[in-house]
Image (cartoon, coloured by chain):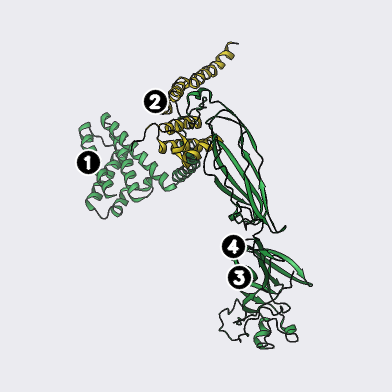
Chain colours: A green, B yellow
């Protein structure tokens, strides 16, 4: 592996105390033109491209790795995904946009290594060059005392020994532009000699196999013939034609599927699934399939052939009357269900999902009702309302019995209750003397209430009596007064 | 003993009801298969659709319905039926093959009895 080479660090600026003043104007100088081949300065980040060693062939797909080496003492504030360029190559997108991070110690210097992967494929013959570049922003930490005696991390002396450096310890934010050392590769053309007729550009190392979904079939019953190419190489050029014309079979265009083992798609398997239908009963053999590729290791073409696959085809039985090509029916229909909707659309599932929500709502409702029940103001109001209703019932009963003291006692309680409700006060504490102040906005109503309360006092303490007719007349006045008190409330 | 039998009785009734339910579609299914074998594909399609409506559906029923529709020249409904069968039984290789075959080249799969245009 080649040692890391560092490009220059250009257009950098000082940000004294990043947290305090990150947007100080660019005060520093700009370094000279980029020199990608310049050796990395000690303590500075380095960028390297690790690729295939030796020669390549046109079409050969190879993985490459890009490594950013960040020594301790330098913080990577921001980094853009690196770019790969080379005129004679096609470059796949980076397999990982976010780098893989690891720790390493190189030449005794502990550092963080960020890695990206990609794949490149040679498209032009001759000497070719591949380069990688990366941009970012770094912050270097350097103790002020040591910096005064050692060369600067980034080769500048602008603030050496200055007040700012002594105060903030020499934190520097710098824009970073790094280029890797060019990777020089000699790309060769694929040889003409020995090129198979069915060669379609596949370059790599592969193994090839084919199999059917079953070695026994029924005439007219579709089978799947699966051809599989596994290994390492440019899978986009891997093609298997499948069975094209086979006597006794109906064949269809293969469905192609690729399963990559690595994110670059260099290693993996490509599957060609072809539906075939045997048309006649008997013992058949499926012709072998071929696949040709160029092996760069052996520097020669390779043709792989699958095994001949035996197949026993039974007659269609009931389908003896079936014309070839008709699908055989299934005698067992299995368990029939009226609701074939997927589970997540069924009412039971949706109900199960709603259950926690309903439970939560119920708990919230119960909590609200409990809080309401325990509210002292509301409890007092309810008690007064109950007392009022009871007083009205007592009043009616006393009226019918011509029991004047009981009647007026009920009238007093009813009026006290209604006034208590209206004023939010304790009904038992209200007397005729309070009424004037309590109904100041309606003197007529206050007079009526006062008169009724005085009558109640008279019947309670002076031993007055009244007949049923008088009590009924008073009842009308009482009810009217209570109604007015309620309206005014 | 009697309470024990009384406790078993509902389960027995349930078992009987289930068995009766399972035996339900056998006859219409054989009628549909017979119609298919005799080349009366439209009748087979109707019979399978009747089973689906009255008895319910399954992957195999949709497969058979798709086969009958394919034979009757109803390529779109056939693909839909195979899709439904595939939805109910994603790992059924026969259904997947039939679906692929119906999608790839439906006109080659059978000798169509009618061509309206």
Which of labels 4 and 3 is toward the front? 3
In this figure, which residue is indicated by the disc labeled 4? A92
Q: Position of residue A53 (x, y in %)?
A: 72, 66
Marks 3 & 2, CB-CB < 8 Å contact: no
Which quadrant of the structure image shows residue A158? Answer: bottom right
Q: Work out how far the residue at label 4 is from the one at label 1, CA to CA, in angstroms.
A: 99 Å
Chain label for disc 3: A
Q: Is residue A390 above or below residue A437?
A: above
Residue A365 location, x and y as percent? 45, 43
State how far apart marks 3 and 2 are (Cα): 66 Å
Q: Nearer the viewer, residue B74 or A383?
A: B74
Residues at marks 1 and 3 touching, judged by CB atoms closer than 8 Å: no
Disc marking residue B43: 2
Q: CA separation, marks 2 and 4?
A: 56 Å
Residue visible at 34% across and 47% down in the picture:
A421
Q: Residue at x 31, y 34 (%)?
A: A393
The residue beneath circle 1 is A477
Q: Mark 2 and mark 1: span between their CA atoms?
A: 89 Å
- Mark 4 vs mark 1: which is more N-terminal? 4
Callouts 2 and 4 close, C-beta under 8 Å: no
> Which-is-in-front pick, marks 4 and 1?
4
**Does mark 1 fall on the same chain as mark 4?**
yes
Residue position marked by numbered label 3 in the rendering: A86
Q: Is residue A316 visible?
A: yes
Chain ID, mark 4: A
Which chain letter matches label 1? Answer: A
């Amino acid at each position: 592996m080649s040692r890391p080479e560092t490009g220059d660090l250009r257009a950098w600026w000082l940000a004294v105390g990043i947290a305090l003043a990150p947007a100080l104007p660019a005060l520093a100088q700009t370094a000279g033109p980029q020199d990608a081949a310049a050796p990395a300065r000690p303590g500075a980040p380095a960028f390297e491209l690790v690729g295939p060693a030796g020669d390549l062939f046109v079409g050969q797909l190879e993985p490459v790795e890009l490594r950013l080496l960040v020594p301790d003492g330098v913080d990577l504030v921001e980094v853009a995904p690196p770019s790969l360029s080379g005129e004679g190559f096609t470059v796949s997108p980076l397999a990982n946009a976010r780098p893989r991070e690891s720790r390493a110690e190189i030449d005794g210097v502990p550092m963080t290594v960020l890695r990206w992967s990609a794949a490149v494929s040679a498209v032009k013959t001759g000497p070719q060059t591949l380069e990688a570049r990366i941009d970012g922003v770094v912050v270097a930490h350097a103790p002020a005392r040591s910096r005064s005696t050692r060369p600067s991390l980034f080769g500048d002396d602008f603030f050496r020994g200055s007040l700012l450096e002594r105060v903030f310890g020499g934190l520097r934010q710098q824009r970073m532009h790094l280029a890797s050392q060019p990777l020089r590769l000699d790309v060769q053309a694929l040889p003409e000699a020995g090129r198979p007729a069915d060669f379609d550009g596949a370059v790599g190392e592969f193994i090839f196999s084919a199999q059917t979904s079953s070695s026994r079939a029924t005439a007219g019953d579709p089978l799947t013939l699966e051809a599989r190419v596994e290994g390492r190489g440019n899978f986009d050029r891997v093609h298997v034609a499948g069975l094209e014309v086979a006597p006794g079979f109906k064949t269809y265009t293969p469905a192609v599927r690729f399963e990559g083992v690595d994110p670059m798609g260099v290693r993996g398997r490509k599957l060609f699934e072809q539906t075939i239908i045997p048309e006649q009963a008997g013992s058949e053999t499926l012709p072998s399939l071929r696949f040709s590729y160029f092996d760069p290791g052996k520097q020669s073409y390779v043709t792989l052939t699958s095994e001949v696959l035996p197949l026993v085809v039974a007659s269609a039985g009931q389908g003896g009357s079936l014309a070839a090509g008709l699908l055989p029916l299934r005698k067992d229909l299995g368990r029939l269900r009226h609701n074939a909707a997927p589970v997540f659309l069924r009412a039971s599932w949706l109900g199960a999902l709603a259950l926690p929500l309903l439970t939560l709502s119920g708990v919230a409702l119960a909590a609200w009702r409990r809080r309401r029940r325990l509210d002292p103001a509301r409890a007092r109001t309810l008690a007064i309302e109950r007392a009022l209703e009871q007083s009205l019932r007592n009043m009616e009963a006393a009226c019918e019995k011509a029991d004047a003291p009981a009647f007026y006692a009920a009238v007093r309680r009813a009026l006290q209750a209604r006034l208590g409700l209206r004023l939010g006060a304790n009904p038992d504490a209200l007397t005729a003397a309070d009424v004037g102040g309590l109904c100041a906005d309606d003197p007529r109503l206050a007079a009526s209430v006062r008169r009724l309360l005085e009558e109640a006092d008279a019947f309670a303490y002076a031993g007055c009596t009244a007949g049923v007719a008088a009590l009924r007349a008073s009842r009308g006045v009482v009810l009217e007064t209570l109604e007015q008190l309620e309206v005014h409330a | 003993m009697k309470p024990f039998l009384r406790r078993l009785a509902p389960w027995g009734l349930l078992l009987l009801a289930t068995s009766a339910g399972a035996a339900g579609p056998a006859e219409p299914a054989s009628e549909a298969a017979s119609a298919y074998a005799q080349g009366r594909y439209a009748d087979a399609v109707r019979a399978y659709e009747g089973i689906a409506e009255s008895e319910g559906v399954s992957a195999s029923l949709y497969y058979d319905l798709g086969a009958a529709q394919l034979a009757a020249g109803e390529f779109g409904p056939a693909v839909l039926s195979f899709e439904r069968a595939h939805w109910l039984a994603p790992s059924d290789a026969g259904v997947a093959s039939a679906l692929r075959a119906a999608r790839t080249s439906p006109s080659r799969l059978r000798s169509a009895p009618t061509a309206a245009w």
